[in-house]
Image (tube, rainbow, N blue to C red):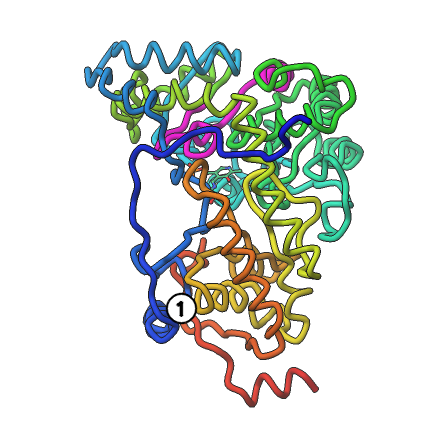
């Protein structure tokens, strides 16, 4: 009989202790943080599922490569290795390093967009939307209708609604749409993949109108593996071959190497357009650095050069996707409402369905995230009314899994804590804001639990 157990395809060489706190301690800590988990120190967190971004454990090969890092201001061989590694997978003519994904976004939109433009995407991530809006353009989300129903199972729930894209182009006029984006996997829509068929269909529409297509590539390897698992015709292809095909349909990409770059910092911007590349490099020098380092140390470029390849290893992807699905399927089988099917990097709990007695205006996602912290020292993040304001279509709590950092027993612990909170969900109260910033308010907002009286009134 073939052995079925999927294991972590690595062993651990260096460990980092994590600290347990008591519920009383956590109560004080979260209160002092204005009930915003972004404002709690990481040393007071037991299992940190705030993000999968920049939190990966690096491999011995990455650490070894870092020693080769050449810190020359210009023309570093580390840049050459980084560029070659990126080009071998992504295939674009110009590779511009940036300190992280949002820097690539800022440069892309500054060069390509003007006030009044419209940028369609399957779903813009929050920094993508903010950078787009910052230059006066409108960030237009066009997910397929299935994406709006958390419980609905669809193999490629991250797809863009191609018909609505065509409509939007007709309505706005080609001149108003400087580029179209596709986010793989679709983070804000539940970490759901985009199919090759959809990438091709979107490209077809873009091509017809002469509009360039850019891919937000953060989790490209996970997306490629989902295509292998779910899309007819791809089962025998390697994730690398699939990734190459995905990018062959695009004119460029933005990338946060903090995700499928397996690095703790870094990103890049790619394009096939020589004129745009020159403008982008000019802007890069202004705020990021010379085009052969773009705000990164030579060491970081080396770590990314190796990490991109490790992210595409099949044994790794198999374990990665299985581990995320284990968490999702276990809690879902006990009735916890999650975005179905489980995504690549994270499980998203539907907080509106989990806490139907807490109205969206009282931030059910924040309420659930705080309870998971109080119960078990787990940090997650709200993606809902606090993050997007009244435009939020869902209130989700994301449990993002850092790459290669936690083991199966950590995941089992998380399952147990969530199920404990599920059993006492009726006692969980909503929140109200006491302080907020003008944009990206979720990072710094301070809140307090609604008084019992308000809570009772809401229930009547
Ligand atoms: N695009 C997507 C789809 C992302 O998920 C992120 C970051 C970015 C762009 C921006 O990249 O952080 O390197 O500037 N997402 C992180 C997260 C922060 O937690 O999901 P960055």
Q: Is residue 115 visible?
A: yes
* Residue visible at 70% across and 41% down in the picture: 143
Residue 284, quarter of the rendered image: top left
Q: Residue furthest bottom?
A: 453
| Relative vertical location of residue 246 with respect to residue 146 in this rendering, above or below | above
Residue 101, quarter of the rendered image: top left
Q: In what element is the residue under mark 1?
A: strand
256 or 167, which is in the foreground? 256
333 or 105, which is in the foreground? 333
Q: Is residue 393 visible?
A: no
249 or 134, which is in the foreground? 249
The reply to whether the magenta stretch includes residue 267 is yes
* Residue visible at 66% across and 14% down in the picture: 237
Q: Local crowd at mark 1 within 10 Å, few (<14), some, or many (≥20)?
A: many
Q: Position of residue 407 (x, y in %)?
A: 46, 43
Q: Quadrant of the N terminus?
A: top right
Q: Does residue 373 appear to the left or right of 339 in the view shown? A: left
Q: Position of residue 98 (x, y in %)?
A: 36, 27
Q: Quadrant of the C terminus?
A: bottom right
Q: Position of residue 331 (x, y in %)?
A: 64, 56
Q: Which residue is mark 1?
A: 446
Q: Position of residue 392 (x, y in %)?
A: 62, 57
Q: Which residues are magenta?
A: 243-269
| Relative vertical location of residue 421 with respect to residue 460 in this rendering, above or below | above
* Residue visible at 25% across and 10% down in the picture: 75
* Residue visible at 56% across and 76% down in the picture: 428
């Amino acid at each position: 009989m073939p052995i079925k157990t999927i294991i972590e395809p690595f062993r651990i060489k260096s460990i980092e202790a994590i600290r347990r706190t008591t519920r009383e301690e956590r109560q004080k800590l979260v209160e002092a943080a204005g009930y915003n988990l972004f404002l709690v120190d990481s040393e007071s967190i037991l299992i940190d599922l705030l993000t999968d971004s920049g939190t990966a454990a690096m491999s011995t090969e990455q650490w070894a490569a870092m020693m080769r890092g050449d810190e020359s201001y210009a023309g570093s061989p580390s840049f050459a290795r980084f560029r070659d590694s990126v080009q071998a997978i992504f295939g674009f003519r110009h590779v511009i390093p940036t300190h992280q994904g949002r820097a690539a976004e800022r440069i892309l939109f500054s060069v390509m967009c003007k006030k009044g433009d419209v940028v369609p995407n399957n779903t813009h991530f929050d920094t993508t939307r903010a950078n787009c809006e910052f230059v006066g353009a409108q960030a237009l989300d066009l997910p397929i209708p299935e994406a709006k129903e958390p419980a609905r199972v669809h193999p490629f729930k991250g797809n863009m609604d191609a018909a609505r894209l065509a409509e939007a182009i007709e309505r706005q006029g080609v001149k108003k749409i400087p580029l179209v984006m596709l986010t793989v996997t679709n983070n804000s829509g539940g970490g759901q993949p985009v199919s090759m068929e959809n990438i091709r269909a979107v490209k077809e529409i873009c091509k017809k109108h002469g509009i360039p297509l850019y891919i937000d590539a953060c989790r490209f390897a996970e997306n490629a593996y989902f295509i292998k698992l779910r899309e007819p015709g791809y089962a025998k292809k390697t994730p690398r071959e699939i990734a190459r095909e995905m990018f062959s349909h695009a004119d460029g990409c933005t990338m946060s190497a903090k995700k499928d770059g397996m690095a703790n910092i870094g990103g890049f911007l790619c394009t096939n357009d020589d004129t745009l590349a020159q403008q982008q490099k000019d802007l890069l020098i202004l705020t990021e650095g010379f085009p052969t380092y773009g705000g990164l140390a030579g060491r970081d470029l080396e770590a990314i050069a190796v990490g991109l390849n490790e992210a595409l290893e099949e044994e790794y992807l198999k374990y990665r996707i299985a581990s995320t699905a284990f968490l999702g399927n276990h809690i879902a089988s006990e009735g916890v409402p999650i975005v179905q099917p489980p995504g690549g990097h994270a499980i998203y709990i539907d907080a509106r369905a989990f806490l139907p007695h807490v109205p969206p205006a009282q931030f059910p996602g924040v309420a659930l995230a705080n309870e998971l912290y109080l119960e078990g020292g787990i940090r997650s993040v709200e993606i809902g009314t606090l993050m997007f304001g009244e435009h939020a279509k869902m209130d989700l709590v994301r449990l993002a899994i850092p790459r290669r950092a936690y083991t199966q027993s950590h995941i089992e612990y998380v399952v147990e804590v969530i199920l404990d909170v599920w059993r006492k969900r009726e006692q969980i109260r909503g929140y109200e804001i006491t302080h907020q910033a003008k944009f990206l308010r979720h990072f710094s907002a301070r809140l307090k639990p609604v008084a019992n009286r308000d809570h009772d009134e809401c229930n009547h």
